[in-house]
Amino acid sequence: MFSKDIGIDLGTANILVHVRGKGIVIHEPSVVAIDVNTQKICAIGEEAREMIGRTPGNIRAIRPLNEGVIADFQITEEILKHFIRKVAGRGFRPRVMVCVPSGITTVERRAVVEAATLAGAKEVYMVTEPIAAAVGCGLDIAAPSGNMVVDIGGGTTDIAVISLGGEVTSESLRIGGSHIEEAILRHIKRVYNLAIGDRTAEDIKTTIASAYPDPEKKMSIRGRDLVTGLPATIEISSTDIYPAIEEPIFSIVDAIRGVLEVTPPELAADIMNNGMSLTGGGSLLEGMARLIQERTGVPVTLAEDPLSCVVRGTGQILDSINNMSRAPFVVSYTKGR
C-alpha cells in the first residue's frame, strides 16, 4: 500500500517539510497570526511573518516554538495539521518523523509526539537534530569513526560527536540565531535610543553582523526615536554591532570546546582528521566558521545548504526505516491513534 512519509524539521525560526520521493516541499517561518478575541488562526507561515510588527490590536503574530521545543501546544498542533494536510491531503494519515534538540526532556518529547499524532500522523518517529544533520551532510554515522556536527538553529545549538550510529558526547545549548537578533535589538535600543522591530534585527544580523567585524560593513536602519517618539534613520556598521553579538557567539564556541574536552582521545583524533561539520541557519553568520576553527584548532566545513541539512537527513532516515529494526538513533516511536 502506498504511503506518504513526511520528515519535519520543527524549528524555532522555520519549519521545513520533506516528502518521500519529492524532497523538500515546504520551507516557511514558524509564525502564526492569531485573533486574540476569538483565538482563531488568521495566517500561518510566510503570510503570518509579513504581519509581524504590522498587525492591528486584535491580531497577534507569535512563534509557538521556543528554543526548539513547543511553547504553545494547541497552536503547534494546528501548524502541524496545516502542513500535513497540505502535503498529504485530508483523510490520509502518513508516517511522520520529527527532529528535536538532543537535550529535549521527556515531557517535551511527549508533547511533540502528541501534537503530531493529533495533527493526523499514523506513526510518529523522532530523531535528534545532530544525527539528522550528520545524515543530511552525507556523513557515514554508522562507521566506527568520530564525526562532529554543530547545528546552530534559531533557538538552540546542538553539538555532538557521533560514532557507530549514536551520540558519544553531546550538548544542547539553548542559544541560537533568535538570541543573536534579541541581543542586536537590545543593543540598538540601549546605545542609539532607537526602537526597532524583530524583522529589522534579523536584517542587521544577515546583512552586516559578523563574528569578525572586519572588513567593516554599513547599513541604514529605521525605527522610532525613544527620546522624541518620532521615526528616525541611523547608519550602523558591523563594528558597532559586534559588542551585541559577542556574548551569544562566544557561548556557542565555549560549548563546542566543552564537548571536545570530554571526547574520547581516539574519536578526538578522528575529528582532527575529518574536521567538524557546521549546519543550521546560524552557521551562515559572517565569520562564524572561521572563529570556531581558530578557537578550537579543528578544521571546520560549512555544509552545503546548511538551512536544509536537518530536514534532508530526517527524510533520508525515514526513507530507510523499513530496513532498520529500531535504529539506535530513532529516539522515540509511537503508534498514531
Image: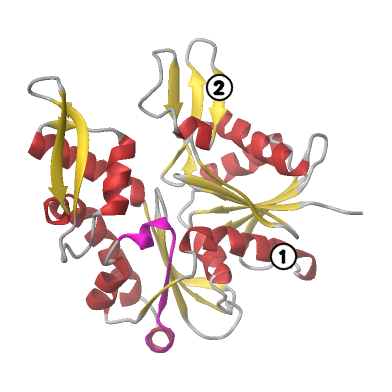
Give above or below for 337 relative to 276: above
* Disc 1 to disc 2, C-alpha distance: 40 Å
Q: How many marks?
A: 2
Coordinates of residue 209 in the picture (x, y in percent):
24, 55
Where is residue 113? Give x, y as percent: 64, 43
Position of residue 82 in the picture relative to residue 49 (left or right): right
Q: Are marks 1 and 2 in contact (CB under 8 Å)?
A: no
**Residue 114 seen in render:** no
Q: Residue at x 40, y 52 (%)?
A: 156
Residue placed under numbered mark 1 in the picture: 326
Residue 277 image position (x, y, % from top left):
43, 73
Q: Residue furthest right?
A: 1
Identified at 69% across, 34% down, the residue is: 118
Name the outermost residue toward the top. 37
Q: Quadrant of the C terminus?
A: top right
The residue to which callout 2 is attached is 42
Residue at 58%, 39% (x, y): give it.
111
Q: In this picture, which residue range is highlighted in magenta?
A: 272-285
Disc 2 marks a residue whose amino acid type is: Cys
In this rendering, the answer to whether 9 lies above or below 114 is below
Return the residue nearer the eye: 174 or 41.
41
Determine the secondary structure under disc 1.
Answer: loop
Q: Residues within 10 Å of mark 2 (few under 14, many from 20)?
A: some
Q: Residues within 10 Å of mark 1 (few under 14, many from 20)?
A: few
